[in-house]
Amino acid sequence: MSSGFMVELPLSRSDEDGHYSVLKTITKAIVQDFRTLVLTNPGERVMDANFGVGMRRFLFEQNNEQTLSSIDSRIRSQAKTYIPAIRINSINFVRTENSPAVDPNYVGVKIDFTIEPLKARQVLDILVS
């Protein structure tokens, strides 16, 4: 059994790691934590009702600049509070003609960020439906 930082989500069986796959690098662990932060709804995390961006709650909002600005602001404030080791470089919303994100039942976001202590630049793509 190899050691790791945390269990990889979604859970999957691993003969190499033992019962479940584990994340073996700090970078992968931070990316998974950030994805969890963005997808968790406020109030969903036990003992911390403020944790989470709650991307799914924006699905039925107007698809306009005000809503996109609210999502951007929420992502930045949550990251600053819960994962201060990252710096967000840019947040872009998926709105191309050939993308399912044009459908009002989708919210797509691409977040370019840097894990400051490691100087590791990463991109997190999320498409929520």
Image (cartoon, rainbow, N blue to C red):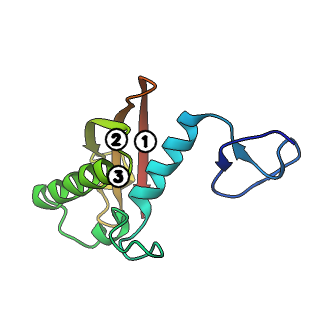
- Under circle 3, the secondary element is strand
**Eyeballing the image, is 47 above or below 78?**
below
Of mark 3 and mark 1, the one earlier in the sequence is: 3
Q: Give the alpha-carbon distance from disc 2 to disc 3, as whole Å.
A: 10 Å
Q: Are marks 3 and 1 in contact (CB under 8 Å)?
A: no
Quickly name the residue at label 1: 124
Of mark 1 and mark 2, the one earlier in the sequence is: 2
Residue 128 in sight here: no
Residue 99 in picture, x, y percent from top left: 36, 48
Amino acid type of the residue tagged 2 in the rendering: Ile
Q: Residue at point 46% right, 72% down?
A: 45
Residue 81 in picture, x, y percent from top left: 30, 53
Question: Residue 111's mark?
Answer: 2
Residue 37 in sight here: yes
Q: Residues within 10 Å of mark 3 (few under 14, many from 20)?
A: some
The quadrant in which the N terminus is found is top right
Quickly name the residue at label 3: 108
Q: Viewer-proximal residue, 128 or 113? A: 113
Q: Are marks 1 and 2 in contact (CB under 8 Å)?
A: yes
Amino acid type of the residue tagged 3 in the rendering: Gly
Residue 46 in picture, x, y percent from top left: 48, 76
Q: Residues within 10 Å of mark 1 (few under 14, many from 20)?
A: some
Q: Viewer-proximal residue, 99 or 65? A: 65
Q: Give the alpha-carbon distance from disc 1 to disc 2, as whole Å.
A: 5 Å
**Eyeballing the image, is 86 above or below 80?**
above
Q: Give the alpha-carbon distance from disc 3 to disc 1, as whole Å.
A: 11 Å
Q: Nearer the viewer, mark 2 or mark 3?
A: 2
Amino acid type of the residue tagged 1 in the rendering: Leu
Q: Residue at point 75% right, 48% down?
A: 21
